[in-house]
Image (tube, rainbow, N blue to C red):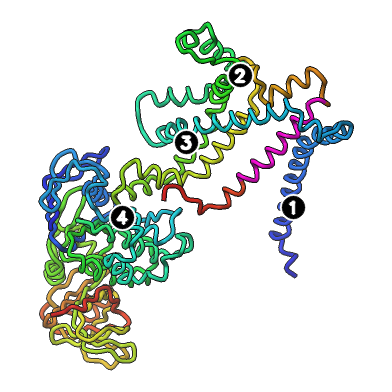
Amino acid sequence: MALEIIDVTKKLGHFTLGPLSLRIDKDIMVILGPTGSGKTTLINLVAGIIKPDNGRIISDGVDITNKEIESRRIGYVFQDPTLFPHLNVHENILFGLKRKERENWETMPLVRKIIDDLGIAHLLKRNIVGLSGGEMQKISLARMLVISPKIILLDEPLSHLDTSTKDRLRIELRGILRKQQIPTIYVTHFEEDIYALSDSIAILNNGIIEERGNLEQILNSYIKPLSPSHSFLRTVTGGGNYISGKVIGSRNELTTFKVGSNTLFTVGKFSSHSKIGVMVKREDVILSKEKINTSARNMVYGEVVDIIHTSNVVDVFLKSDELNLVSRITKTAAEELAITIGENVYAIFKASAPHVIREEIDIN
Amino acid sequence: MSNRNPYLTSNRVNLSGFKLTVIILLALLVLYIVYPLIGLIFITGSINLAEELTRPEIINAFVLSITTATISTLILSIFGIPLAYALARFQFKFKLLIRLVVIVPLVLPPLASGTILLNAFGPYSLLGRAIPIDFTQSVVGIILSQIYVASPFIILPAQAAFEGVPEGYETAARVLGKKKSEVFFKISIPLAKTGILVGMLMAWIRSIGELGATMMMSYNPHTISIQIFEDNAIGGLKNTVPGIVWLLILSIFALTVFLFMKRHHSLKFGW
């Protein structure tokens, strides 16, 4: 199963998308781009809601460029959940099925499994009115999964949710989407979504794919800052540090995880041997030339590999074994510390600073 | 202490001033509508209402009006609801022209509609001669008149209702594998339900009250409106009471049906 987009172009008023080519195999491609970059246009082309001016779209070896929307078998989760307000939760979930299937849904293992995986069994009899934003998006996910789609498209499904729901659902979402083994496009303008969900990444700007790669390549950009031509990617990955490590254990709501030879701590409980991904804001990382005794749990001794001065702050890039970190300090602090490239310093942050956004249990 | 707060005090004064204005306006209008009905009660006292209400020509006219209005509303629904949907959703040539055509029966005085209908369907007209059906002085004539005059009453509310349905729901349903026709019946109609029902009810009531066009097309058999018109001509106001009472009973019934339907939002179509 694969989705191929070949030389597709679409003109909408003054905006032109493409020419654009992408191939997505059975994994999750996160397409990151600013508002107005053509993200929604791109997935609407795949869904058939709009037709391309040129180019072809191939799903599972079949040319679907001119197929009607309803015969494409697309699982589309919109920014708004678009749950049908005149139907209750279970009628919404079963909407895409045939009448016979709807009547016998309880005997369909697939439907049961999706409902269980999403943890929405207790909502089935409820009306749409009164559900929380997170519940609505889960039902919207279930509704598209039950039709066994050949392609999954997600248009910033988490953008209208509050932060804590967003974080929780994002972690679940990766697990659920990974299980499907279906070509998936997730469009977003949030940097975190790259780390939380992606197998591969494409950066869309002004209707053109500016860059593509996988998570590792993006992470390398921490240590080898991107060239100025990659200005958009630089701004979107400018906010935080993404750190991925293996959980050693949890005690007292404190989880220990290892990144190479470094041991780090984060608040929360995660199962041993799972792999977690956390974000740490650049501003949350303190630098010190000497080892100091503080209440902060995390202390990393690393080499300064680069220092970048911007108008009013200084970004200091550190490397310690497999761990790359960026600390953002004020100009004054940088002058007083007098850090130079090549020397070793301590990077310190609290256990509450890392913000877990990815969790994978099925680690080999 | 707190009642010294100048904002709070002035707010209160404003609110009650506004309320008072609304109450006065409301009371005057309600009084204006109810006052003539009070006169009706005094007249009713001087006749044998039960006997009058069951007068055969009154009953016949009333049943005829309800039957023809129901048929007209059903025919109007079959043609008018898809037309309203097309006007709300599709872009096509001459759309503006069709919008204008739709409101013609609303703009024309019913009597004028009746004259042009008579000209088009009368026994000496092209259609009247070509088709061996009595278009005038018949039930068919009544229905034709009602459909003509009541059509905007269903099309306009239904169009507004369809325009109020976010297109995203229809797109989502199609992405989930439903054909355009299925989307129409399972999504668009149920979501526009209230507006459509309002339109159907208004068309039905308008059809029952129809006089002008029906008079030209089909004075006989008598509908309730024509019966009231004739009763008045023969015996004055006193004679019209039973027809009016029947229509009042009907309007209370119609209002109850409407409120009931509006309450039951879960009422589903096509699921």
- Mark in front: 3 vs 4: 4
Q: Quadrant of residue A147?
A: bottom left
The range drawn in magenta is B239-258
Q: Percent position (x, y) of residue A43?
A: 24, 51
Q: Is residue A86 left or right of residue A308?
A: right
> Magenta segment: does it hold B242?
yes
Which residue occupies the extreme bottom position in the image?
A293
Q: Is residue A44 left or right of residue A7?
A: right
Could you tell me how many numbered marks the image carries? Answer: 4
Query: Which residue does the numbered mark 4 point to in the structure image?
Result: A97
Query: Which residue does the numbered mark 3 point to in the structure image?
Result: B159
Real-space Cα distance between discs 3 and 2? 25 Å
Real-space Cα distance between discs 3 and 4? 29 Å
Labelled pair 3, 4 in contact (Cβ < 8 Å): no
- For badge 2, the amino acid type reads Ala
SS at mark 2 in the image: helix
Counting residues from the start of the chain, the first of labels 1 and 2 encountered is 1
Labelled pair 4, 1 in contact (Cβ < 8 Å): no
For the N terminus of chain B, the image quarter is bottom right
Label 3: few (<14), some (14–19) or many (≥20) C-alpha neighbours in 10 Å: many
Q: Percent position (x, y) of residue A243?
A: 20, 76
SS at mark 1 in the image: helix
- For badge 4, the amino acid type reads Leu
Real-space Cα distance between discs 4 and 2? 49 Å
Label 4: few (<14), some (14–19) or many (≥20) C-alpha neighbours in 10 Å: some
> Does residue B26 show up?
yes
Which circle marks residue B213 in the picture?
2
SS at mark 3 in the image: helix
SS at mark 4 in the image: loop
